[in-house]
């Protein structure tokens, strides 16, 4: 991903892209900038919806076993985004204001985040492991007006510091507790009960300089800092990724991937959420990262993103399984050697 300058725009020193599929291919940044000039995520999302309305873009597992799946087509995703945008506007979310998202990887994240973008507001995701003190700092620093949280556990943490967040006017809960909710706390389903806004009209008003999100640093050398990522930065980086993968735009719609790393990190946000909206990748939400191997066996992802520790665990797990069966281990090693020869011949 490219370093960014002020407001998240591509840094002027980054004058190339890199295609990692075969031999190195250097792509001038100016060429990518011309390709995405004037574009935003909402504008490109509506192109995907218009061209592929019946394509499944979002998936989640029903229950705890992979026996059945929930699925949402591009048209259904857009409809939920239009309804969420109407609800958020009804409850006061305006352009340049902040929407706090506090949940695991789940389909709801995508339409609430998208709705904020269409409103030219700024969705801000925070890690689902955040303590009340961390929530107070991040929500306060972001000046969040509205929060959408997953369930009673997430709600409990945010309520502990609510008195220290005077700008946070309303909290919506996707899975509310059975008991009565405090003042200012509502079921998230309420956000979908205020009609639909015209997404085409909203998208036409979006600009490349609009903030797509705030991403907070880890805070290892001081308080976390909010990094401004613009719409222009996002569409530039998605186009950069497309070229790195060596694929035409028409090859992306429906390509499968699993979203399992925190949406509060720009790498996961870019890989799954933004690629899903901009180029039509099919995103399956995995709320528990420890279950990603189970999901992978069922989803058969065509792209897989992970940090080094993820691949280390996969490597150790495969080797542990193979060590118990010498015959399988030999076949695996033969297959791996053949695959490496094939890749070497492609260079």
Image: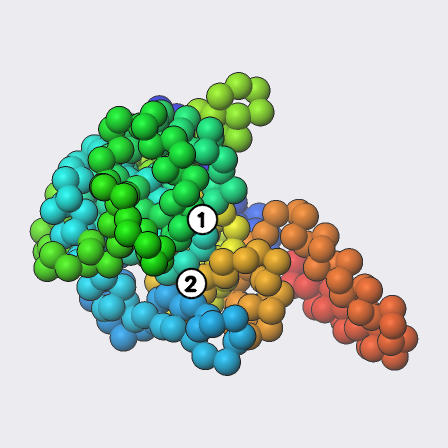
Pointer 1 residue: 153
Neighbour tally class for label 1: few under 14, some 14-19, many 20 plus, Cα within 10 Å:
few
Q: Nearer the viewer, residue 80 or 11?
A: 80
- Coloration of the structure image: rainbow
Quadrant of the image containing the C terminus: bottom right
Q: Nearer the viewer, residue 124 or 194?
A: 194
Count up the numbered dots: 2
Can residue 206 be seen here? The reply is no
Q: Nearer the viewer, residue 44 or 118?
A: 118
Circle 2/circle 1 CB separation < 8 Å: no
Which callout, 2 or 1, points at the residue further toward the start of the chain?
1
Task: Name the residue furthest front.
Answer: 179
Q: Reply above or below: 4 against 199.
A: above
Per the model, the C-alpha gap separating discs 2 and 1 is: 25 Å
Residue 90 at what x, y percent from top left? 11, 47
Q: Reply above or below: 293 against 213.
A: below
Secondary structure beneath label 1: helix
Pointer 2 residue: 283
> Residue placed at 71% from the left, 55% from the top?
313
**In the figure, is residue 62 to the left or right of 184?**
right
Secondary structure beneath label 2: strand
Q: Nearer the viewer, mark 2 or mark 1?
A: 1
């Amino acid at each position: 991903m490219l370093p960014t300058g002020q407001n998240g725009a591509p840094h002027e020193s980054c004058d190339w892209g890199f295609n990692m599929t075969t031999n190195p291919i250097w792509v001038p940044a100016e060429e990518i900038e011309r390709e995405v000039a004037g574009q935003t995520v909402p504008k490109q999302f509506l192109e995907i919806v218009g061209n592929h309305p019946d394509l499944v873009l979002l998936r989640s597992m029903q229950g705890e076993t992979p026996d059945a799946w929930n699925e949402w087509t591009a048209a259904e995703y857009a409809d939920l985004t239009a309804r969420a945008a109407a609800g958020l506007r009804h409850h006061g979310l305006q352009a340049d204001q902040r929407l706090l998202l506090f949940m695991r990887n789940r389909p709801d994240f995508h339409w609430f985040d998208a709705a904020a973008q269409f409103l030219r507001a700024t969705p801000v995701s925070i890690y689902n492991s955040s303590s009340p003190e961390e929530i107070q700092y991040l929500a306060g620093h972001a000046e969040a007006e509205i929060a959408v949280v997953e369930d009673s556990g997430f709600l409990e943490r945010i309520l502990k510091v609510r008195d220290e967040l005077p700008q946070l006017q309303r909290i919506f809960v996707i899975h509310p507790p059975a008991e009565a909710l405090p003042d200012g706390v509502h079921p998230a389903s309420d956000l979908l009960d205020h009609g639909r806004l015209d997404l085409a009209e909203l998208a036409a008003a979006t600009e490349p300089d609009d903030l797509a999100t705030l991403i907070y640093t880890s805070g290892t050398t001081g308080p976390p800092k909010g990094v401004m990522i613009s719409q222009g930065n996002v569409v530039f980086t998605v186009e950069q990724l497309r070229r790195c993968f060596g694929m035409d735009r028409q090859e992306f719609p429906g390509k499968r991937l699993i979203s399992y790393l925190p949406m509060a990190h720009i790498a996961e946000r870019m890989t799954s959420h933004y690629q899903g909206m901009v180029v039509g990748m099919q995103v399956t939400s995995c709320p528990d990262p420890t279950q990603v191997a189970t999901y992978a066996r069922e989803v058969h992802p065509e792209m897989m993103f992970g940090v080094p520790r993820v691949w280390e665990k996969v490597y150790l797990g495969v080797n542990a399984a193979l060590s118990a069966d010498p015959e399988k281990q030999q076949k695996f090693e033969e297959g791996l050697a053949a695959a490496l020869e094939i890749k070497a011949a492609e260079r």
